[in-house]
Image: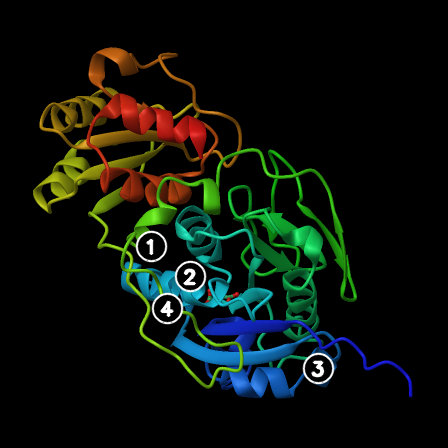
Amino acid sequence: MPPAAAPLPCVRLLATGGTIAGAHTTGRGYRAAALSIEALVAAVPQLATLARINVEQVAKLGSQDMTEAVWRKLAARVQAAVDDPALTGVVITHGTDTMEETAYFLNLVVRSDKPVVLVGAMRPATAMSADGPMNLFNAIAVATATAARGRGVLVVANDEIHFAREVAKTNTTQLGTFASGQRGLAGLVNSGRPHFYAPPVRRHTAASEFSSASAPSGTGVPPVVGTGLTRRKPALFPRLPRVDLIFAHAGMDRALIDAAVTAGARGLVIAGVGDGNLGAPALAACAAAAKKGVAIVRASRTGGGVVERNIEIDDDRLGFIAADELNPQKARVLLMLGLTRTRDPRTLQDMFFTY
Ligand code: SIN
């Protein structure tokens, strides 16, 4: 008798919606998150050659409606899945609009070396030449790859593999929207065959100081059994403080900064001009906010480069934090997490140099 074939790896597929699950309404219009995850899996029978897949519809939304509450729920589901010894990896379907923020959040809070892969699509599932099916096939392949372990949370789309920290959506409609301009790609994936390049440069997942908070020690996160038959309630990540993100521009006054502070923001990220700069009235408002204990992070609206300390703005004197390489939306994620630990600007600055 021939030896029995090794069982296929088991992957947990968590769905949140997005254009990958979108369906056309009238003309060129479509509705994101219209289709269930079961329908997406049924449309790609080839997935059964890669893995045994068990699915859960965690949310059903366009990612413009993604919230911190869903992030926390998703983090708990991912943690429960990766803690299950029967599971090889996790794939999350997600809209592309805010995928980079969810990916970076999970990159900092999930405690595991197992692959966690976010996947989306630019064309709805009902479109001519939809990109979702191949993206999903590639994402499942990456989630089963031994070489994907220890690389943090990944994003797969358009035959590319991106690190959560590096990836950004850079185009409104084109398939090649995702770019990892500064540090480059994590790898490529061709019809289910991944090729990995250099490892990620900063701390993440199992080495992140935030990942222990997703499963407070002593309570443990009970496993989701790989068959999907037994599911117990996983622990939730603690609530996140309010952090607002304000886009700087020529002629900016202080009104939006003051409004954010009045609304109760514990931190502000400024998508500053150039090297994270902002004009005198807005700068004065930020300085006043920092004096009151609001954490001020200077990021850049340019889409590339490093925001360094003390170049045109005296961060040391004003108590500001430079975003280093993070774009404004990811700086907001890190600041929210950082503020769950400290309000000290120097400690927060160290986090921006670490993650
Ligand atoms: C969304 O982010 O949910 C809509 C856009 C997309 O998925 O490409």
Closer mark to the observer between disc 4 and disc 3? 4
**Residue 286 placed where, x, y %?**
19, 27
Q: Residue at x 58, y 57 (%)?
A: 115
Closer mark to the observer between disc 1 and disc 4? 4
Are circles 4 and 2 on residues that touch, CB within 8 Å? no
**Residue 249 placed where, x, y %?**
33, 33
Q: Residue at x 45, y 48 (%)?
A: 104
Type of amino acid under label 1: Ser
Type of amino acid under label 2: Gln
Q: Give the residue pinned by disc 1.
A: 214
- Give SS at disc 2: helix
Q: Give the residue pinned by disc 2.
A: 79
Instruction: Name the residue at the front extreme.
Output: 1
Image quarter in which the N terminus is found:
bottom right
Are circles 1 and 2 on residues that touch, CB within 8 Å? yes
**Marks 4/3: CA–CA distance:** 27 Å
Q: Give the residue pinned by disc 4.
A: 222
**Marks 3/1: CA–CA distance:** 31 Å
Q: Give the residue pinned by disc 3.
A: 48
